[in-house]
Image (spheres, rainbow, N blue to C red):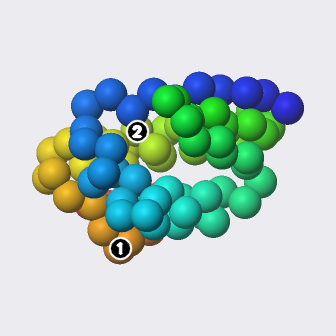
Amino acid sequence: MIERIYILESVDPVIFYGVNNVNMQLIKTLFPKLRIVQGKCDEVIGDEEESELFLKKIREVEKYCEEFNSLSEDVILDIIKGKAR
């Protein structure tokens, strides 16, 4: 098991995580093999390949959120499942 730390740096946490953490709950369901612990920074625990994929995708989600100052369920699904945005 690998433990990685992800720090949200450039976006509004309320937009990124969503009201009542709905965006993060969706992201967690899309990565069922990982354990994602939220706090001052997010901890991602799981195998190396899956955690690397998670970090790559979460950075893409953050980049989208930074650029458009919004984030929806459809956008999260498109980015994580690999559809072009």
Q: Can residue 76 be seen in this view?
A: no
Q: Do the residues labelled 2 and 1 touch (CB within 8 Å)?
A: no
- Please state, as top left, top right, bottom left or bottom right, where the C terminus lies in the image: bottom left
Three-letter amino acid code at disc 1?
Asp
Q: Is residue 43 positioned above or below 80 on the image?
A: above
20 on left or right of 74: right
Looking at the image, which residue is at 78% across and 39% down?
A: 46
The kind of secondary structure element at disc 2 is helix
Q: Estimate the x, y position of residue 16 in percent, counting from the top left.
A: 34, 51
Picture coordinates of residue 61, whole percent (x, y): 36, 49
The residue that label 2 is drawn on is: 59
Q: How far apart are marks 2 and 1 (CA)?
A: 16 Å
**Which of the 4 image quadrants contains residue 60?**
top left
Badge 2 density bin: few <14, some 14–19, many ≥20, Cα 10 Å: some
Q: Is any atom of residue 42 visible in this view? A: yes
Is residue 50 toward the left or the right of residue 1 in the image? left
**Residue at 50% across, 30% down:** 40
Whether 79 is drawn above or below 36: the answer is: below
User: Residue at the location (43% across, 64% down)?
Assistant: 20
The image position of residue 67, as x and y in percent, is 15, 45
Q: Where is residue 37 in the image (x, y as percent from the top left)?
A: 65, 42
Identify the residue at the far right of this view: 1
Circle 1 is placed at which residue position? 74
- Report the residue at 78% width, 28% height from top: 2
